[in-house]
Amino acid sequence: MPKKTSSRTIQKNKIIEERRKDKRYKCLLPAHVIEAEGKERFIQRTTVHDFSQGGLKLVVNIVTLDPGSDVGLEVYVPEKGLKTLVNAEIAWKKMAEDKLEIGLKIRDMKKGDKKELLKWIAPVGVGKKKPKIIKKKK
């Protein structure tokens, strides 16, 4: 006789479809929002909590930012002495405890800086192509 599965277990093991095309890497990098919604000299310290080829997640105190808004920020990697500008668009936002998490789609960032940042966050496997899966003919 098969075991009964509780709805809690089913919920816990539920597969959630991932819509991102780039692998995200968890990190904790200091950053400054230097422009938001076209307002220059708008400076707020923040942190990048994950980073990928196409975007990143910030945790901020600003609550007026909405999806579709443009954001300019400086991201720092103190250990490498790297400081880079990122122009992005807010893709999503959600409240987590008393902070606002925002997902940014990178529009413009120096290619070399992005590569260096990714190499530092996830030195193994970055820049390598995915292996091809060869299907056997029947």
Image (cartoon, grey):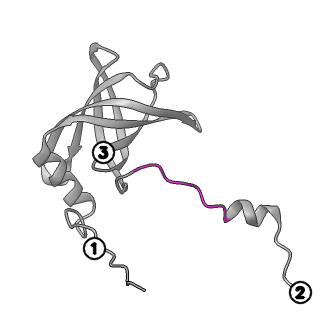
Which residue is under mark 1? 131
The image shows residue 52 at horizontal and vertical percentages of 31, 50
Q: Secondary structure at mark 1?
A: loop
Labels 2 and 3 touching (C-beta < 8 A): no
Q: Main secondary structure of the magenta part?
A: loop
Q: Which mark is residue 1?
A: 2
Query: Position of 52 compared to 59: left or right?
Result: left
* Contact check, label 1 and label 2, Cβ < 8 Å: no
Does the stretch in magenta take in 72?
Answer: no
Name the image quarter holding the C terminus.
bottom left
Which label sits in the foreground, 2 or 3?
2
Question: Residue 54 shows which numbered tag?
Answer: 3
**In x, y percent, where is residue 73?**
26, 31
Q: Position of residue 10 (x, y in %)?
A: 74, 64
Whether 18 is among the magenta residues is: yes
Vertical order, 57 against 115 (above or below) = above
**Residue toward you, 50 or 22:** 22
Amino acid at dot 2: Met
Category of crowding for the residue at label 3, using alpha-carbon neighbours closer than 10 angstroms: few (below 14), some (14–19), many (at least 20): some
Range covered by the magenta-colored residues: 13-20
